[in-house]
Amino acid sequence: MSSEEINAASLGELARAEAACTRCPLYRNATQVVPGEGKVRSSLMLVGEQPGDKEDIAGKPFVGPAGQLLDEILEDAQIPRSAVFVTNAVKHFKFEPRGKRRLHRRPNVGEIERCKWWLEQERRLVAPKTFIAMGATAIRSLTGRSQPVSSLRGKTLELSDGTPLLATIHPSYLLRIRDPDDRARERLGLQQDLARGWEMARHLPQT
Ligand code: SF4
């Protein structure tokens, strides 16, 4: 059965279908697919780029360094992670082998477009009231816009069905900032963006 014929009735069924996906070449070298995680009817859906090295091994999203940082920031923003659905625009890890290491490579537009089908399936099942797109890949997947994050950060956009989407940075960006003051400022900005998205989600009626 092709992925186009799948109309999963549950997140578990969807994860099994994703595990058999061959819609783009990324399944070939990754350890496993990394589906989104959370509950059906979560108010808020956080969308990142793709699984990293640790997520690829664990089969779970946001468990590596960027995910641990995201957990801390969610806690500081008083957002229970259990109330949020976390996922990625692309479900397999794209990397370049370098000795024993696997270096992250950004997914291209074709891979984002192919994998969008799965994100839309998650969206159908979870029906979040608000999205937070973390980073350019998530923004591209959800809105079709290929713009630098800096030009959209903190802005609230509207998807075609009226669902609000707040654009912000990916937590992995914070890990690359060397200057402690710059890092603290950007971290606070992400925390404020997440808190704003959470407030929006909490005050909208469930569809
Ligand atoms: S990255 Fe997405 S589209 Fe590509 S094989 Fe994996 S699940 Fe399928």
Image (tube, grey):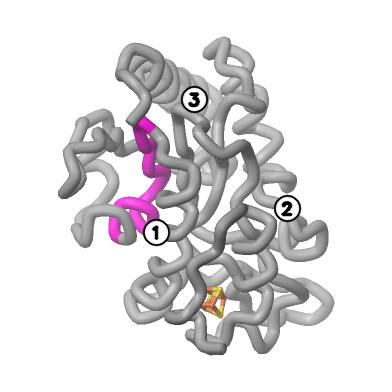
- Left or right: 158 with respect to 199? left
When the figure is inspected, residue 186 is found, relative to residue 2, above or below; the finding is above
Q: Residue at x 51, y 31 (%)?
A: 42
* Range drawn in magenta: 129-140
> Splitting the image into four quadrants, where does ligand 1 fall?
bottom right
Question: Which numbered disc flags the more N-terminal residue, 2 or 3?
Answer: 2
When the figure is inspected, residue 114 is found, relative to residue 151, above or below; the finding is below
Q: Nearer the viewer, mark 2 or mark 3?
A: 2
Question: Residue 94: image x %, image y %?
Answer: 58, 74
Q: Which residue is mark 2?
A: 60
Q: Which residue is mark 1?
A: 120
Is residue 189 among the parts visible in the rendering? no
Question: Cβ of disc 2 within 8 Å of ligand 1?
Answer: no
Question: Cβ of disc 3 within 8 Å of ligand 1?
Answer: no
Q: CA distance from mark 3 to mark 1?
A: 29 Å
Question: Which quarter of the picture shows residue 207?
Answer: top left
Question: Which quarter of the picture shows residue 84?
Answer: top right
Q: CA distance from mark 2 to mark 1?
A: 19 Å
- Left or right: 56 with respect to 157? right
Q: Residue at x 23, y 54 (%)?
A: 143
